[in-house]
Image: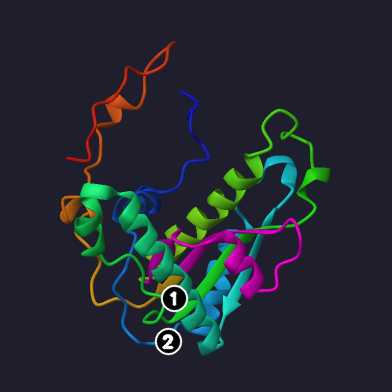
Amino acid sequence: MTDPTPHRFSDAEIAAVYRAIYERRDMRHFTAAPVAPEQLARLLDAAHHGPSVGFMQPWRFVRVTDRALRVALHGIVEKERLATAQALNERGDEFMRLKVQGILDCGEVLVAGLMENRERHIFGRRTMPEMDLASVACAIQNLWLAARAEGLGLGWVSLFDVGEVQRLLGMPAGAKPVAILCVGHVERFYDEPMLQTEGWAKRMPVALCADENSWPAAAPDTAR
C-alpha cells in the first residue's frame, strides 16, 4: 500500500518539534551569560523564514546593544506596567507582584516591528490589512521555538507605549514596534506557563476553542 505520508519526518524529529512547542515558555528570569553570535544569527534566520501573507516579509528586528537604550526601554516598560496596574483595578496589586520583563538581565534584547510603507502590499490584505501583524507574529514564533530548541529562553514584552519606542529607536513614519523580545540563557525553564503558576490564569481545554461547522460556544472565564 502506498505510504500516505511519504514526506513525514522521522519519529525522533517529529518528537523534537512537538517538544519545542510544548516546552516553550514566556521567560522572565535570565542569567547574565551572553548569547553566542552564531546562535543569535540562527534565531534571526529562523524568524526570517516565517510565513508571511503575499510574501511581504513585514518584520524588522532591531538588536539593542547600547546599555543606555536598554535602560530607556526598561523605563518605558515600567511606566506602562504602572498604568496597566491602575487599569486592572482590584487586580492591580496582584499584577504588580508579577515579574513582567527581563530587559536588564537577558543576554540579548530584540525589538520586533512592522515595516513602513505596508499599505502598498495588498496581496492577501485587501480585506484583512492586519495580516501584516499576523506575519510578524509568525516570525516571532519561529524565533521562539528555535530558541527553545537551542536551550535559550525568550520573553515577549508588550507593555510599552508604541510612540515612545518608535522615537527611541528612530523608526520611520509608518513603522510600528510589536514586541520587545528578551533572549538569553536561563537556569531552568518553567514547568508550566508562569502566569498559570502564579494563579493569574490557566490554559483552556482545546475543546473550548475548536468546533465543527460553527463557532465554538462561549468559553468560561478562566482567569480565576
Q: CA distance from mark 2 to mark 1?
A: 19 Å
| Residue 15 locus on image (x, y percent) | 33, 50
Tell me which label, 2 or 1, sits earlier in the chain.
Answer: 2
- Do the residues under discs 2 and 1 have CB atoms within 8 angstroms? no
**Which residue does the image show at 61% across and 62% down from the upper left?**
163
Quadrant assignment, res 217: top left
Q: Classify 218 as above or below 101.
A: above
**Which residue does the image show at 64% across and 40% down from the upper left?**
131
User: Is residue 9 or residue 58 the one in the foreground?
Assistant: 58
Q: How dense is the environment of label 2, judged by Cα within 10 Å: few (below 14), some, or many (20 and up)?
A: few
Disc 1 marks a residue whose amino acid type is: His
Element type at marker 2? Answer: loop
Relative to 172, 73 lies left or right: left
Q: Classify 167 as above or below 49.
A: below
Residue stretch in magenta = 152-181
**Which residue does the image show at 36% across and 51% down from the upper left?**
21
| Residue 146 locus on image (x, y percent) | 46, 62
Relative to 173, 186 lies left or right: left
The answer to whether residue 221 of the structure is visible from this angle is: yes
Disc 2 marks a residue whose amino acid type is: Pro
Q: Classify 100 as above or below 34.
A: above
Q: Which residue is mark 2?
A: 34
Q: Which residue is mark 1?
A: 74
